[in-house]
Amino acid sequence: KAGVTQTPRYLIKTRGQQVTLSCSPISGHRSVSWYQQTPGQGLQFLFEYFSETQRNKGNFPGRFSGRQFSNSRSEMNVSTLELGDSALYLCASSLGTSGRAGHEQFFGPGTRLTVL
Amino acid sequence: AQSVAQPEDQVNVAEGNPLTVKCTYSVSGNPYLFWYVQYPNRGLQFLLKYITGDNLVKGSYGFEAEFNKSQTSFHLKKPSALVSDSALYFCAVRRPRTGGFKTIFGAGTRLFVKA
């Protein structure tokens, strides 16, 4: 079974631009979560989507948004990029409909975004 | 507010010796606890989890972790370290009551295993 895939793997943008990152979960997984990883802040939760609906949201400004499609694929968008948005963006998918079942998350390799 | 603390930025251990990576948490209720490992230029890989039941849980690659409710700790252990265990380790917590998969991660502990 294929793992979580993320595209692109590397991205270089300039301040003020916008960017869209894509994530394809493991087949059969309906929950997709996004995390931002930076050396200073570590891993921070951005948002989670389930059945095309945002179910949880972290403490990020409105410039960060996402969506999920009917095939569970997800995209996240960052508008008006800032230097501080440079990070590794990780996508994770999970089996099951609820986190209460205790399923772990499966992570993709990430998209390394550099903002110049 | 829920939080996860990994008090050591780095742990150094010689190959063949036992290793411990520490984790404490501050979360109300009965959280779910996880350990993940990250190798360079890779995403996170799941190692093990505590949901309920036996306090000692066993996971991948010979790792185990002990849940201690009174000390709110979930330390990762391995009886005999390998050089290939060198990586970045994350402790994580999830509150089942949130209903989703939102997970809070510790800052990470870098493990160096010397040959």
Image (cartoon, coloured by chain):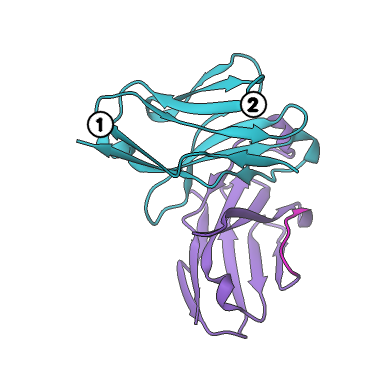
Chain colours: A purple, B cyan
Answer left or right for B112 relative to A50: left
Q: Position of residue B91 (x, y in %)?
A: 54, 38
SS of the residue under disc 1? strand
Closest to the observer, A97 or B17: B17
The residue lying toward the viewer, choosing from B45 and A45, is A45
Q: Position of residue B79 (x, y in %)?
A: 35, 20
Residue A16: within the magenta? no
Label 1 lies in what chain? B
User: Pointer 2 indicates a residue of which chain?
Assistant: B
Q: Which residues are magenta?
A: A56-61
Residue located 61% across and 84% down the image: A17
Per the image, the residue denoted by label 2 is B72
Where is A99 relative to A108, above or below? Answer: above
Does the CB distance between marks 1 and 2 fall below 8 Å?
no
Q: Residue at x 57, y 72 (%)?
A: A84
**Pointer 1: what residue?**
B14
